[in-house]
Image (cartoon, rainbow, N blue to C red):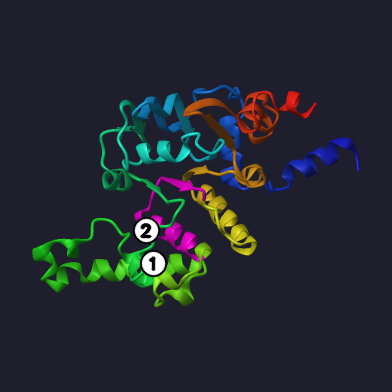
């Protein structure tokens, strides 16, 4: 076979790269590795976000844009302000100043439930499963705009019967997907730590989010469930969702992240691809100390 024939044959072969990964890579291909760098199509755009507790400045992020449809990791040493930044963006805390726009809507004045309804949902480092409710009830409580939650409407069964049936069907599909279907009638408090992480992620999807924010999704998870969680996060990207997650495990970051933002002492110090970040002196200094090389000698 000639070189030209081989080239044609190669072009005819379908790409083995999933569509979500290909789109994310294309969107970030020419983005320079700099803190606060503009993105091609940001779903989240935050500027001048500051949160101080007395004299301690926990977060002071000048600018951050999160690319739509990509998986972005937010990393940094303990105490860098990552979870506080998450809390601010999702309405669980209030900044001293700053503003951010989510999917074209000003979100810094929204309360947490309004942020979730707008399409940005989150999970927590310490899971928030309602332990004395069943797994199914945990799922159903995550559905939005439930007619039956109103006092008068709740008294009229036909008004909410069809909606609840649809919510239950959706919950069953998600529980099957996250391999929790056999646990649907168990109390959430009976689940393992890893299963609670899966439940929290599944419940978040009851809202049909456009962006999912995961705070240390792998913390306290056994290796078998860790791989399952990794695959579920990848699936979110393939379904068109944006993912922003906090993580310390760089192996995981390399495996699933399209882009990495690095915080230290409350500030965003750099951004880039996983490979760029791993070789960045600012990141090495932030994790190990600026004088770690001298200390070793």
Could you say which quadrant of the image residue 291 lies in? top right
Q: Secondary structure at mark 1?
A: helix
Q: Is residue 291 left or right of residue 66?
A: right
Q: Which residues are magenta?
A: 195-216
Question: Number of numbered discs present?
Answer: 2
Mark pair 1, 2: CA separation: 7 Å
Residue 235 to residue 174: above or below? above
Image marks 1 and 2: residues in contact by CB distance under 8 Å: yes
Residue 164 to residue 239: above or below? below
Report the residue marked by disc 1: 171
Figure quadrant of the C terminus: top right
Figure quadrant of the N terminus: top right
Residue 59: give x, y in percent of width and height. 42, 30
Q: Which mark is residue 160?
A: none
Q: Is residue 22 left or right of residue 115?
A: right
Indicate yes or no whether the magenta region holds residue 190: no
Indicate yes or no whether the magenta region holds residue 200: yes
Tell me which numbered mark, 1 or 2, is placed earlier along the sequence.
1
* Image point (50%, 40%), residue name: 69
Could you say which quadrant of the image residue 75 lies in? top right
Q: Is residue 48 left or right of residue 258?
A: left
Q: Is residue 289 left or right of residue 263?
A: right
Report the residue marked by disc 2: 206
Residue 221: give x, y in percent of width and height. 57, 59
């Amino acid at each position: 076979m000639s070189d030209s024939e081989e080239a044609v044959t190669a072009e005819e072969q379908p790409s083995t790269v999933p569509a979500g990964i290909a789109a994310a890579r294309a969107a970030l291909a020419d983005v320079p590795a700099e803190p606060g760098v503009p993105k091609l199509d940001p779903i989240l755009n935050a500027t001048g976000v500051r949160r101080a507790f007395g004299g301690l400045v926990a977060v002071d992020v000048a600018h951050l844009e999160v690319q739509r449809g990509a998986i972005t990791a937010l990393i940094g040493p303990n105490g860098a302000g990552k979870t506080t930044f998450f809390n601010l963006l999702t309405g669980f805390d209030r900044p001293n100043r700053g503003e951010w726009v989510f999917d074209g809507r000003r979100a810094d004045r929204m309360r947490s439930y309004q942020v979730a309804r707008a399409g940005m949902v989150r999970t927590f480092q310490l899971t928030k499963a309602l332990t004395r409710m069943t797994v199914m009830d945990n799922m159903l409580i995550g559905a939005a705009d439930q007619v039956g939650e109103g006092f008068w409407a709740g008294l009229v069964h036909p008004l909410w019967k069809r909606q609840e049936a649809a919510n239950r069907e959706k919950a069953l599909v998600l529980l099957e997907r996250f391999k929790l279907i056999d646990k649907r009638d168990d109390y959430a408090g009976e689940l393992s730590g890893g299963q609670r992480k899966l439940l929290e992620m599944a419940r978040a999807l009851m809202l049909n989010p456009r962006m999912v924010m995961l705070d240390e999704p792998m913390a306290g998870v056994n290796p078998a469930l860790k791989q399952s969680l990794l695959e579920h996060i990848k699936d979110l990207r393939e379904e068109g969702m944006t993912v922003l997650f906090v993580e310390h495990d760089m192996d995981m970051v390399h495996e699933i992240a399209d882009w990495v933002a690095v915080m230290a002492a409350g500030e965003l110090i750099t951004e880039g691809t996983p490979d760029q970040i791993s070789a960045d002196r600012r990141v090495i200094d932030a994790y190990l100390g600026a004088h770690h090389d001298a200390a070793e000698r």
